[in-house]
Amino acid sequence: MQPYQFVVLVPGVLLGAWGLWQRLGRTSTARRWATGHEKARRDAMFSRPFGGLALVMTGLIETLFRWPVTAVLGSVVWVASVVVAFAFGGLLQLPYPRWLEPRWLRQPRSRTRAAESS
């Protein structure tokens, strides 16, 4: 790996790890974003983890393009992560399917809605 690849790779790993920690929500601190406004929710669910993955893939691009199979797989992962980060998290803020929310976030809402309807 070249030294210039670390300029993109290190922030990508840090951003992805932060986003993954928030998305997994194993502690109350990690789940705090769920009670925030919509922008905070979208950042935690889509922009950070998928943006971090896109940066990691960008940092690994020279390494991945040595072999055709990894070039194709890496390109697909990179494009998918950029599309998800921009479409649902960043620029477009399109409505996202409920199954993309973390399971721990979906369950309390289902219980709340069931209690409200009865």
Image (tube, rainbow, N blue to C red):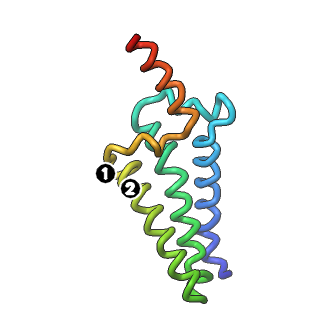
Mark 1 crowdedness (10 Å alpha carbons): few <14, some 14-19, many ≥20: few
Residue 7: x and y in percent read 60, 69
Q: Residue furthest front?
A: 118
Q: Which numbered tag is attached to residue 92? A: 1
Q: Is residue 40 left or right of residue 19?
A: left
Residue 81: x and y in percent read 47, 61
At x 55%, y 88%, the residue is: 68
Whether pointer 2 and pointer 1 mark residues with C-beta atoms closer than 8 Å, the reply is yes
Q: Is residue 37 left or right of residue 92?
A: right
Return the residue at label 2.
86
> What is the secondary structure assignment of the residue under circle 2?
helix
> What is the secondary structure assignment of the residue under circle 1?
loop
Q: Nearer the N terminus, badge 2 or badge 1? A: 2
Q: Is residue 16 above or below residue 37?
A: below
The three-letter code of the residue at mark 1 reads Leu
Q: Marks 2 and 1, how far apart in space?
A: 6 Å
Q: Relative to the observer, which residue lies in front, 94 or 38?
A: 94
The three-letter code of the residue at mark 2 reads Phe
